[in-house]
Amino acid sequence: MIKAVALMAALSASFAALHTAPSDASALNAKCLLVIDGVTRLDDRCSFTSHGETDSFSDERLLVVCPDGRPVQTSDCFGYQMRVARNGVYGFLQREGSAARLCWNTGNMRNAQACFDGLIQKGDCWQSIASRSLGRGTMHKLKFCAWDD
């Protein structure tokens, strides 16, 4: 459990650094779909990468800036000073055997903090009729899919 929490924290921090400025369209290499409780959160081209048992996805729209208004890559500021200037969706799917955990940034956060356990693979999608929200214990219906663009 500690290893999973540490991995989520590290991935979340790296996504905040990677997905904080506009990118060119060539980074959008897939089509992603994220639906939570019947609400479509992402249904568009996305950046999708796979590293071992962890997949990451982003719509490349999130912009995080420092107090001077410049993107965090071109300005020095501390994490507590950063703010979201433009919403965007990103997250990761961590596969653990035949199940997976999905974490995402709820579309307006710097970190992928909303996490759900118990997703199973069905074709190009990972889904669950009743996925437990970590930390809250509430159940949710999720579906995440990624296809080559």
Image (cartoon, rainbow, N blue to C red):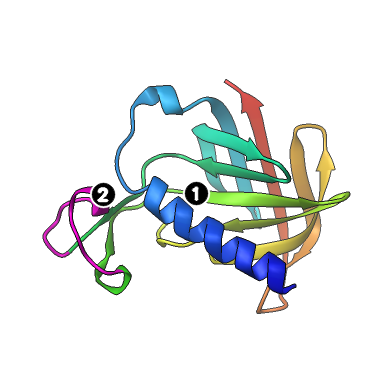
Spot the residue most to the right.
98
The residue that appears at 61% across and 45% down in the rendered structure is 34
Is residue 10 or residue 118 the one in the foreground? Answer: 10
Report if residue 73 lies within the magenta region: yes
Residue 90 position (above or below residue 111): above
Percent from the top left, x then y, of residue 49?
58, 35
In the picture, which quadrant includes the N terminus? Answer: bottom right
* Magenta segment boundaries in residue numbering: 67-78
| Residue 35 visible to an observer of this rendering | yes
Specify the principal SS of the magenta part.
loop
Instruction: Mark 1: give few (<14), some (14-19) or many (20+) Cα within 10 Å.
Output: many
Badge 2 is on which residue?
73
- The residue identified by callout 1 is 90
**Residue lying at the far bottom of the rendered structure:** 136
Q: Position of residue 75 (x, y in %)?
A: 18, 55
Is 53 a magenta residue? no
Question: Taking 12 as reference, is 78 left or right?
Answer: left
Identify the image quadrant of the C terminus. top right
Q: Tell me the amino acid under the disc marked 1.
A: Tyr
Q: For mark 2, give the secondary structure.
A: helix
Q: Is the residue 26 above or below the residue 21 in the image?
A: above
Residue 18 is left or right of residue 82, and the answer is: right
- Residue at (72, 78) in percent of width and height: 137
Using residue 35 as the reference point, say whether residue 15 is left or right of it.
left
Q: Residue 126: horizontal and vertical position, in percent?
A: 76, 44
* Frontmost residue, 9 versus 63: 9
Alpha carbons under labels 2 and 1: distance apart: 18 Å
Give x and y (percent) for residue 95.
Answer: 76, 50
Check disc 2 and give the amino acid type.
Answer: Gln
